[in-house]
Image (cartoon, coloured by chain):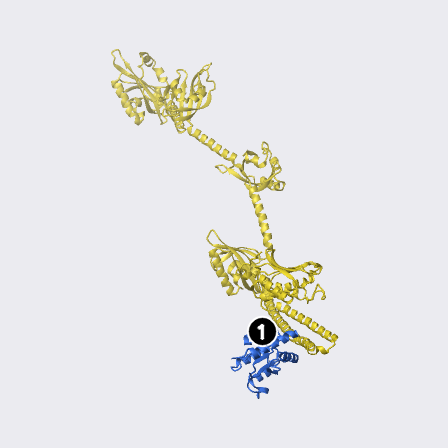
Amino acid sequence: MSTRTLLLVEDNPQDELLTLRALRKANLNASIDVVRDGQQAVDYLFCTGEFSTRSTTLPDVVLLDINLPKLSGLDVLTRVRAEPHTKLLPVVMLTSSDDERDRLNSYGIGANSFVSKPLEFAEFMSSVGLLGTYWTRTNTPP
Amino acid sequence: MKVPVQGGAIADMAMPREIAPASSDVDNPLNNDKQLIELLPVMVWTTTPSGHVNFVNLQCSAFTGVPREQLMATDMMSVMHPDDLAIHDEILQKMLHGRAAFEYEVRVRHHDGQYRRCLVRAIPDIDSAGEVTRWMGTSTDVEDLRQAADQIKLKEDHYRLALDAAQLGTWHHDFRNDEIHLDARACEHFGVSRAILNRAEFKACIEPADWQASSEDILPQPAQAKNNHRAVEFRVRRPDGDVRWLSSQISVEYSDEDQPRALRTISVSRDITAVKQAEARLRESEARLRRFAEHSDDALWLGDSDTMLPLYVSPAFERMFGRPLHNEFDNADTWLQSIHADDRKELEHLINTRYRTGFTVEFRIVRRDSSTIWARNRTFPIYDDRGELIHVGGIIEDITQRKQFEESLRLERERFDRVVAVVPGVLYSYRRISSEQGQYTYMTPGLAELHGVTNEDLANNAATVFRWVPAEDVRMARSTVAEACQRLVQWRMDYRVMHPMKGLRWLSINAVPVRDADDTVTMHGLVVDITARKQAEEQVQRLNADLELRVQQRTAELSAANEELESFAYAVSHDLRAPLRAMWGFCDALIEDYGAALPQEAREYLQHVIDGSRHLGEIIDGLLALSRSTRGDLRRDPIDISVMAEKILRDIARVEPQRRVTWAIQPGLRAYGDSRMIDAVLRNLLGNAWKYTALRAAGLIRVYAEFIDDEYFFFVEDNGAGFNMEHAEKLFLPFQRLHRQDEFQGLGIGLATVQRIVHRHGGKVHGSGIAGHGAKFCFSLPLPDDTATNLPVIEIQE
């Protein structure tokens, strides 16, 4: 079984630290790449810009924040769903918003899941851990 | 020479008459006393038996102026009237062949040349042998006698003619034989054919009643006939049944004796039937007129033209003057006192100056009971057939009602004028002849001025009202009027006048068309200058448009503000949560990863940071919920309150399984509303109930509904800590709490959220409580009007 790759798009360094710690604690056998804004995420996924030299392998799952500098998470998702080879890429919206509209928009554009970042640390740990586990282990594409 | 008139004698005078033969004694003087014969003042003559004149006396010659010889030579024929020569022949024949005396009247020429009538008498002288030996005669001048008789005859003829002309009949009653003699006219009057009647026959002619009353006058006994001249009227009944009225003038004729005896009555009768009938008709006519006068409501009077005293006044006077009039009219001053003082002078003046020429005047009569009536007197002269003034007549009418009517009309008119004066516009009546022709039959001042024309313009041509009205408005007016006249409906129209002095004016016309008797239509209406109103309307329209714009601007500003608010809430949820999560997360991580290395106190401090973070997080969540409850679309989902409450309580109970709380939920409570929001409401209320029953050994929460004032209220009731109603006004204010944090934790946002959500649904929310005994909250969720009919009825099951 090859190593799973997980792309975290997060502009808040503290959230990034907490998320990475939660994923680490969940004992995922996966490599995690982190980009910090929407543009970087797009470049990463389509191997453009600073990631033009990156191999074209896609991550197994993208954890995508919505509030991002440059391009928002929803913009990124729109681009991903627009390209045939990224169309089926699993994308989980991971956001501190529990706004109804964000949720509806996300599912409307084609997010696979929508997870509101809980405030309580324990809950956060458990949520992120479950996410990582599900998308890197259980939900293996055929 | 006067001849006494003796009845019966006159008629016979001219007739020849046989005279007895003279005795022989007569001869003697003639023979023996020739001298005497010569001196006689009558003509005496003798003839031979064959008629030759052989003697004439001196008088013959004196009378005729012809010598005796000549007279005898011509047998006196030379002096006889030529027309009477035939008589002479007759005389000769009598003498030759007769033996009887005779007399003739012959005209003989007098010596003055005039022929005079003479009576010729002759007697034969007969000898013993019976032979006529000679004729002796006399001729007597009877001319004067005859003339007198002729005069009498003429008079009698005239008298008869007069009687005939007067249709007078004569009759006389002879006392000696009690016979009544009637002339032809009298026979006609009495209806009898015989000229002589006896008393019984005469009586039978008289109407019995009149005979009974007047027989002594009509046919008096001689002893009763005292008054020698009297008149009597009576009726006679003629054989054909006709009854005639006769008037008789009866005179009594007495004898010439020393003790005069009544000989007979002489009567002249006249048929007065026509007069009697005329009199009866006149009486009837007068009676009719009088009845008419007596029954008339108008007072009729007749006055003497000279004395001005009343001759007749009808009974209506008493009614009119309200007092008996026995003496009122004896003295004009008396009745004048009944005339109202203000009117008396004029009336007196008219009476004094115009009594005989007539006048008409109105005045008031003050009656005895002090009431006043209005009267109108018309005085007029009455002339006879010859055009001479005989009477002055008058008619007085009671015109009180008319006056009252006039007065009420005047008051009505005054009221009308007063109303018209304050009507803000011009009233008019317009008689429409055709679409472009007509005339104003009535208008209050100002119509011309409103239309910028003159009154003369309007009088000349009513259409000049449109002089300054735009053609478009004129067309509209004409078609509106035409239709209104056709259908006879009230109409109203606003139109413009480009007034030469005032500029654009708006007028409003309002009219009711009425069809007149002659089939034309007259419009009665009102024209009002509504320029000010129009300007105000335009102002309002401008203001409204302005307002609309401002509302739009405000709405735009508001929605911008709302958007800002939303993005603020969004930012809060993102930007505040992140650092909070970091504080909380790293404290947790610190305790988890390095907790063992930290002193107990440090771990407790970290725990305080975590508690603070948690509290802050709850505040943020509460604020977001509150914010969310007032924005976004409001849905109307069917909600089963009972099921929802049950689910929420189970959720809560799962968190705190150690709590022993029982709940009783009325099943089947249904409502319509935004299910997410109502869920928040119930979660808050039930959460509170759960929270505040924490200190109860046996907490009880009840959910039920009640019908209060036409509305369903859903109740959430607990037996928890309750609250003091003194602070009830703070219940629904955000961040207001009735309990200390160390008693019951909370933010003070829950009930504020509940209230906002219920209000958004148009419902009501109330809370009540007793400190230490529990709290009770209720809310209603009325159905929106437009959906009420489409929604199923909510059934409440006990």
Residue under the image location 70 percent in, 72 percent down: B611
Residue under the image location 47 percent in, 14 percent down: B259
Chain assignment, label 1 = A
The colour of chain B is yellow
Q: Report whether B60 appears left or right of A119.
A: left
Q: Nearer the viewer, residue B472 or A73?
A: A73
The colour of chain A is blue
Question: Residue A41: x and y, percent?
Answer: 59, 82
- Say if B611 sits above or below B213 in the image: below
Question: Residue B679: x and y, percent?
Answer: 60, 65
The single residue placed furthest to the bottom in the displayed view is: A53
Residue, disc 1: A103
Quadrant of residue B38 within the rendered picture: top left
Q: Quadrant of the N terminus of chain B?
A: top left
Q: Quadrant of the C terminus of chain B?
A: bottom right
Q: Element at badge 1?
A: helix
